[in-house]
Image (cartoon, rainbow, N blue to C red):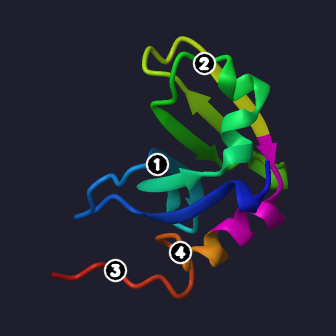
């Protein structure tokens, strides 16, 4: 998987899920510990044509999971029952490109502006 397989990443906060979007979670480290953030993301046609993804009955969510000690991120693709999942490695550079392409700064990282309203 590459950054181009995931577009239009945006926070779920005060958003409705649009056609083609899938709920996504980013679990990541920050100076104060570990954080989980909820997003929507639009997977690419290449994502949907992957044999592992096609083996699932449906896709109910995508988890981007930061690994310890600089190891590649993991992408866990879940079906509704959460019994079966497909796992991909996702290099740090691709993860950061995905964020940049959608103008997303993770909470706890420099430049993040908290939502105020």
* Residue labelled with disc 2: 56
Pair 4/1: label in front: 1
Mark yes or no: residue 66 visible: yes
Graded by Cα atoms within 10 Å as few (under 14), some (14 to 19) or many (20 or more), the crowding at tag 1 reads few
**N-term mark: 3 or 2:** 2
Q: CA distance from mark 1 to mark 3?
A: 27 Å
**N-term mark: 1 or 3:** 1
* Residue labelled with disc 1: 20
**N-term mark: 2 or 1:** 1
**Magenta segment range?**
89-98
Where residue 70 sits: x, y (%)? Answer: 83, 55
Pair 1/3: label in front: 1
For label 4, the SS is loop
Q: CA distance from mark 2 to mark 4?
A: 28 Å
Is 57 rendered above or below residue 45? above
Pair 2/4: label in front: 2
Q: In percent of the image, x 47 and y 82: which residue is there?
A: 112
């Amino acid at each position: 998987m590459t950054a181009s397989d995931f577009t239009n990443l945006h926070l779920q906060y005060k958003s409705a899920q649009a056609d083609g979007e899938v709920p996504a979670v980013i679990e990541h480290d920050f100076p104060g510990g570990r954080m989980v953030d909820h997003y929507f993301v639009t997977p690419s046609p290449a994502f949907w044509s992957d044999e592992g993804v096609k083996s699932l009955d449906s896709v109910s969510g995508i988890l981007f999971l930061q690994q310890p000690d600089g190891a590649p991120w993991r992408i866990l693709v879940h079906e509704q029952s959460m019994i079966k999942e497909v796992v991909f490695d996702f290099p740090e550079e691709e993860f950061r490109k995905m964020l940049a392409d959608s103008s997303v700064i993770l909470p706890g990282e420099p430049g993040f502006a908290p939502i105020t309203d």
